[in-house]
Amino acid sequence: MATTTKTGETREKPKEFPGQTQDEHPGAEHKMDPEPQYLNPGYKGSGKLKDKVALITGGDSGIGRSVAILYAREGCKGVSIVYHKNDKDAEDTRKLIEKEGSKCLLIRGDVCSKSFCEESVQKTLKEFGNRLDILVNHAGMQVYAKSLMDIKEEDLDHTMKTNIYSYFFMSQAALPHLKRGASIINTTSVNAYKGNAGLMDYSATKGANRAFTYSLAQSLAEQGIRVNSVAPGPIWTPFIPSSFPPEKTKAFGQNTPMKRAGQPEECAPAYVFLASDCCSSYITGQTIHVNGGTPTDS
């Protein structure tokens, strides 16, 4: 399916991908075929996030990269990118953010560590004038397993710590520095709503992200801090070839009503909407579904 941007450029949204796999999770964007589409050339910034400072975990590639670039295009003065170990993807993202006129701080480490999360917030505050307006908890991992009996204890533990502990740790570190009007955005998943037989532990953590979002939103409403989430469906990111065997990668996203996977550029505007006071000042405890038409119960 081809889409035409405002600039007149036609970009193909592939329905099928070459079978491929990567040995290391969460994968590398520059090794994908084709590489994900992280920015729609027709997206015009309008200052929705002017002078704000954002911290994005898992911001080096995939959806996180696209969100970071749009935040810069919308006027953020500073964007901190927390990433695990893919230096090339992180550096590429930094250059893209700076091209938009924003400053970028790269922070490498493991979000499973509470002390690292605290350190990441402190580095952001020091770099950008003791200010933090937007926290995007996006870092995650998943390990494909054919059945419950195939889930290894170490994989279960790592998935839980990466996908839900880090959301708690990073939010705890950021909260004392967030002021009225600030926004926390968590990434959940369509799998929190419909489940996934091959990603049971991952789906469980995404359900936890969903509940955490609703609960934290209630807790912080009186402080004027909004907490929402985005639930992506199948989006073409490094997660996919580093999680699934080639035969599943090839058909990725074809089971949606739109019969294709989404691209990061199609998901990222939801994060802009939820971070922007002028768009979502009366929205908290909610989830935006970007999933190609898959029905959910919320």
Image: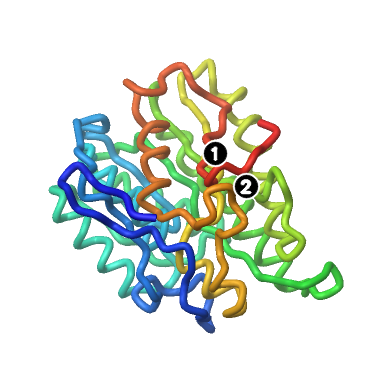
Cα separation, mark 2 vs mark 1, equals: 7 Å
Residue 97 found in image quarter = bottom left
Q: Residue at x 81, y 75 (%)?
A: 150
Q: Which mark, by number, is residue 289?
A: 1
Amino acid type, callout 1 = His
The residue closer to the viewer here, 57 or 107, is: 57
Q: Residue at x 60, y 31 (%)?
A: 216
Q: Which mark, by number, is residue 190?
A: 2
Q: Residue at x 38, y 78 (%)?
A: 31
Location of the C terminus (image quadrant): top right
Amino acid type, callout 2 = Val
Q: Residue 182, image x and y in percent? A: 40, 29
Per the image, label 2 sits on a secondary structure element best described as: loop
Q: Residue 10, image x and y in percent? A: 24, 54
Q: Residue 220, image x and y in percent? A: 55, 24
Circle 1 packing at 10 Å, graded few (<14), some (14-19), many (20+), is many
Please indicate whether residue 264 sits to the left or right of residue 217 in the image: left
Q: Residue 174, image x and y in percent? A: 45, 40
Q: Residue furthest front?
A: 1
The residue closer to the viewer here, 16 or 272, is: 16
Q: Earlier in the sequence, mark 2 or mark 1?
A: 2
Q: Do the CB atoms of the residues marked 2 and 1 lie less than 8 Å apart?
A: yes
The residue closer to the viewer here, 42 or 217, is: 42
Circle 2 packing at 10 Å, graded few (<14), some (14-19), many (20+), is many
